[in-house]
Amino acid sequence: MQPLTIGAFSIQSVHENTGAYITPADMFPTAPPEAVATHFEWMTPTFFDMPSGKLKLAFQSFVLQTPHHNILIDTCVGEDKERTHLEFHMKKWPWMDNLRALGLTPADIDIVMCTHLHPDHVGWNTQLVDGRWVPTFPNAEYVFAKNEYAHWEQESARGSERIGLTFIDSVLPVMEAGQAVLVDHDHQIEDGIWLEPTPGHSPGHVIVNVESNGERGAFIGDLMHHPIQVPHPEWSTCFCWDLGMSAASRTAFVEKHTDTNTLVMPVHFAGATAGHIVQCGVSQKFQFLNDKS
Ligand SMILES: [Zn+2]
C-alpha cells in the first residue's frame, strides 16, 4: 500500500504476508458458487488465485501518525506463536523489518489499537523474551474494547479458544504489564479518531474512524475480508462469530459510505488495499486508489 494522508494524519501499512489462503466455498458458506464465479474475472490474479482456486488475502497492520501520536492499528499474526491453525503456527515473517523500514522502532509506538482479538490482529502485541511473552511496544498504551476483552477472557477461562491460546500469549501479558486500557466501543482516541461498534465478526469488533481537515477514513479491521463482499455484504465468512450480525454491520457500513469521500482501509484486501465504495449499477463495488476504471 502507498503511504496515504487524511488531512493532518499520515497512514502507512506494515505488511506481514499475502497469499492464497482459502476457497470461496469455505470462506463464504452462504455464497452460491455460481454467483461467486461471476466475479472471477476482475478478481484474478490480485484477489483470486485461479490455479489453486483460493482467495488471496493480505495480512497487515496500519501505522496512523498524527501530530500527537504514532498509533498502530492491528498487529497481525506475529512470531513464535503456537497456533492450531497451521498457516499461523510458529511463523517468522519480516513484519518488524517492515516497521523499521518506516523509520519507526517499537519504542516509538504510543498507542496500539486492536479492532478485535483474533490471532491475526494481536500477534505482535507481545514477543518472546527469555521464554516469557512481554509487550512488544514498551511505551504504548494498548486499547481494547471492553466487551471484546470480556468475551475472550471468558472463552479463555473455559478453554474454548478455537485457534490457540491467543488470549493467554498475546493479550493477558499486556494487561499484566499494566499497559492495557479497556474502553467503551465508541471511545475517542484523540481529536478526530474514534471507535465505532461493528459487532458480528466478533462480539466486540470495532472500526476506527478518522477525520481531519474535512477528509475522512475508516480502518475497518475484519468488517470485510475480501472486496467481493462490497457487492455482496450479505456474505459473512466462516470466521465470523454471528453471520447474521456480521452481515448487518457490513451492509450498514457499505450503505453509509457509498459515493462518499471515506477512504476505507481493510486489513485483508490484497493489492492496493485502500479505496472507496462506489455505486456500480444495482450494487456497490470497491474502487481501489490505483484503479480509476
Ligand atoms: Zn483477520
Image (cartoon, rainbow, N blue to C red):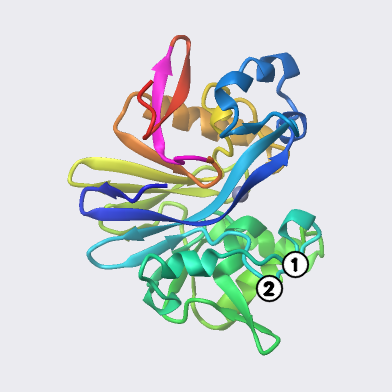
Q: Which residue is mark 1?
A: 165
Q: Which residues are magenta?
A: 271-280
Q: Is residue 228 above or below residue 217?
A: above
Residue located at (57% from left, 28% from top) = 229
> Tag 1: residue type?
Leu
What whole-number distance in Å separates the C-alpha atoms at marks 1 and 2? 6 Å
What secondary structure predominates along the stretch shown in magenta? strand
Q: Position of residue 201 (x, y in %)?
A: 62, 43
Per the rendering, the mark at residue 250 is none
Q: Which residue is mark 2?
A: 169
- The residue nearer to you, when weighing 290 against 78, is 290
Q: Position of residue 225 (x, y in %)?
A: 58, 39
Q: Is residue 144 above or below residue 49?
A: below
Residue located at (63% from left, 39% from top) = 56
Q: Residue furthest top?
A: 281
Residue 170, located in which quarter of the rendered image? bottom right
116 sits left or right of 211 in the view: right
> Tag 2: residue type?
Asp
Q: How many marks?
A: 2
Q: Is residue 49 above or below residue 207?
A: above
25 sits left or right of 227 in the view: right
Contact flag, marks 1 and 2 (Cβ < 8 Å): yes
- The residue nearer to you, when weighing 162 against 94, is 94
Q: Is residue 183 magenta?
A: no
